[in-house]
């Protein structure tokens, strides 16, 4: 940490603020004592210029299009690693050796079943309930079934809860899908991979053996890697805020799922796919490009631009390659992919989009892949939650282990009435 100081002058009083430096990225002003020294708060809606914590898990440089997990570039992990390996990395800080990965994978695999009574929980939902509503309820209910591992002060309890969440979330997600289509639940199988098991529980039926297509399995595993963690986004911040109160980990992850459900966060890939369907064919792209430039037109190019990335989203590069692999394996000829490629080409060479730094993000292609595999759009955010659970768990563990952790309590700029006296009802 740097020992530099920044000087702030308020009402004629000079205040020294420590400047802290991380291993990479911008320095930060430590304003924890600002109110005590000046009687003033900072004002930062959306926390666009505020670091809420220090973390050693994920780093993003939006201007350069960089995403690192524990220092490793996301492109290298997506190309060479597996989701189980990345999960171990996020949780433990280092890539595992062969024995460590085998033991971790075995532990997760043997936790994939859920309590049999939990399966009865689903019948309490309407058949047409959104799968994310089901996910919120069922994941939150896990603490009622696995309360033997909710002592957050016990490191072993935290490890057990972490493994249970990562292991059971694919089973819960697959059951949410099966319930929505009226098919029987399939129990997990220990001879399949994490991702292959999920695909079988989602699309398999008891009447015949399910064949896991390697290219689809690899594509899904890659999608899980690309969505595993993304620094202090809205849902991760929600998990940390809930955890700061001492809430059990199952409740904290349920809170993250609820936040992810918002269309501005987890629903972007569905919006991008719907936009491509609206455009239809490449010859209509110029018309929609002009609409996107018109401030008075409600149409917007979904899947372009990002709150953090002001360069090409490094995850989008991997997604574009993955689309072609899945289409070739499934022998899919979807004109939406050609429309997406042409739209990307036109937008990346248009001065308007270049000036505004509107580059394709991971959501631009992921929806096309998921649709080709067979997932309905209502499941897109569920898959996001499945992948992001490991990041949420890693972030929650890091926060709980921090001896300087405090309950989250943002302040406000009050704009309501000043103090006034109560007026009796008969005098109003």
Image (tube, rainbow, N blue to C red):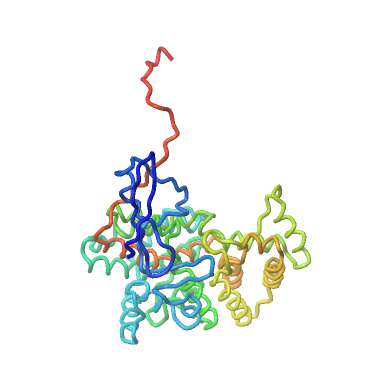
Residue 335 visible within the image: no
Left or right of 5? Residue 263 is: right
Q: In front here: 32 or 95?
A: 32
Q: In front here: 237 or 190?
A: 237
Residue at 34%, 82% in the rendered image: 96
Q: Is residue 244 above or below residue 325?
A: above
Left or right of 296? Residue 41 is: left
Q: Which part of the image, by quadrant, shows the C terminus?
A: top left
Q: Quadrant of residue 150?
A: bottom left
Residue 341 position within the rendered picture, expressed as x and y whole percent measured from the top left: 68, 72
Residue 140 position within the rendered picture, expressed as x and y whole percent measured from the top left: 36, 56
Q: Which part of the image, by quadrant, shows the N terminus?
A: bottom left
Q: Farthest residue in the bottom direction? A: 98
The mark tally for this picture is: 0
Residue 108 position within the rendered picture, expressed as x and y whole percent measured from the top left: 34, 75
Residue at 21%, 64% in the rendered image: 154
Q: Is residue 311 above or below residue 245?
A: below
Q: Farthest residue in the right direction? A: 283
Q: In front here: 397 or 8?
A: 8
Left or right of 146? Residue 380 is: right
Q: Quadrant of residue 13?
A: top left
Q: Is residue 192 above or below residue 372?
A: below
Q: Farthest residue in the top direction? A: 427
Residue 139 position within the rendered picture, expressed as x and y whole percent measured from the top left: 37, 59
Q: Is residue 74 above or below residue 146?
A: below
Residue at 56%, 60% in the rendered image: 268
Residue 147 visible within the image: yes
Q: In front here: 22 or 183?
A: 22
């Amino acid at each position: 940490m740097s020992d530099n100081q920044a000087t702030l002058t308020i009402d004629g009083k000079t205040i020294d603020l420590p400047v802290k430096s991380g291993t990479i990225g911008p320095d930060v002003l430590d304003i924890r004592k600002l109110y005590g020294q000046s009687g003033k708060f900072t004002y930062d809606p959306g926390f666009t210029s505020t670091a809420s914590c220090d973390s050693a898990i994920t780093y993003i440089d939006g201007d350069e299009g960089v995403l690192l997990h524990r220092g490793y570039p996301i492109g290298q992990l997506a190309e060479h690693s597996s989701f189980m390996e990345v999960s171990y990395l996020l949780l433990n800080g280092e890539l595992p050796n062969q024995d460590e990965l085998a033991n971790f994978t075995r532990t997760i695999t043997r936790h994939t079943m859920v309590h049999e009574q939990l399966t009865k929980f689903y019948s309490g939902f309407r058949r047409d309930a959104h799968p994310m509503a089901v996910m919120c309820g069922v994941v939150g209910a896990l603490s009622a079934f696995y309360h033997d591992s909710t002592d957050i002060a016990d490191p072993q309890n935290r490890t057990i809860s972490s493994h249970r969440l990562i292991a059971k979330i694919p089973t819960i997600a697959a059951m949410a899908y099966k319930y929505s289509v009226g098919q029987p639940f399939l129990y997990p199988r220990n001879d399949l991979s994490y991702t292959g098991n999920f695909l079988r529980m989602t699309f398999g039926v008891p009447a015949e053996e399910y064949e896991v297509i390697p290219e689809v399995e690899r594509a899904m595993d890659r999608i899980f890697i690309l969505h595993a963690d993304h620094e202090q986004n809205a849902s991760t911040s929600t998990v940390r805020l809930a955890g700061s109160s001492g809430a059990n980990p199952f409740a904290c992850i349920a809170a993250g799922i609820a936040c992810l459900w918002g269309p501005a966060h987890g629903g972007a890939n569905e919006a991008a796919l719907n936009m491509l369907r609206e455009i239809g064919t490449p010859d209509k792209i110029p018309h929609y490009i002009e609409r996107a430039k018109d401030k008075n037109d409600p149409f917007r190019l979904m899947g372009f631009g990002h709150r953090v990335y002001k360069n090409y989203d490094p995850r989008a590069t991997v997604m574009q390659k993955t689309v072609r692999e899945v289409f070739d394996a499934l022998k899919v000829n979807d004109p939406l992919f050609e429309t997406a490629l042409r739209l990307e080409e036109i937008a990346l060479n248009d001065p308007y989009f270049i000036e505004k730094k509107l580059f394709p993000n991971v959501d631009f292609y992921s929806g096309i892949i998921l649709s080709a595999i067979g997932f309905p759009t209502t499941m897109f955010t569920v898959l996001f939650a499945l992948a992001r659970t490991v990041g949420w768990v890693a972030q929650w563990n890091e926060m709980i282990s921090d001896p300087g952790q405090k309950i989250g309590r943002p302040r406000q700029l009050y704009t309501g009435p000043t103090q006034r006296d109560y007026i009796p009802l008969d005098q109003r």
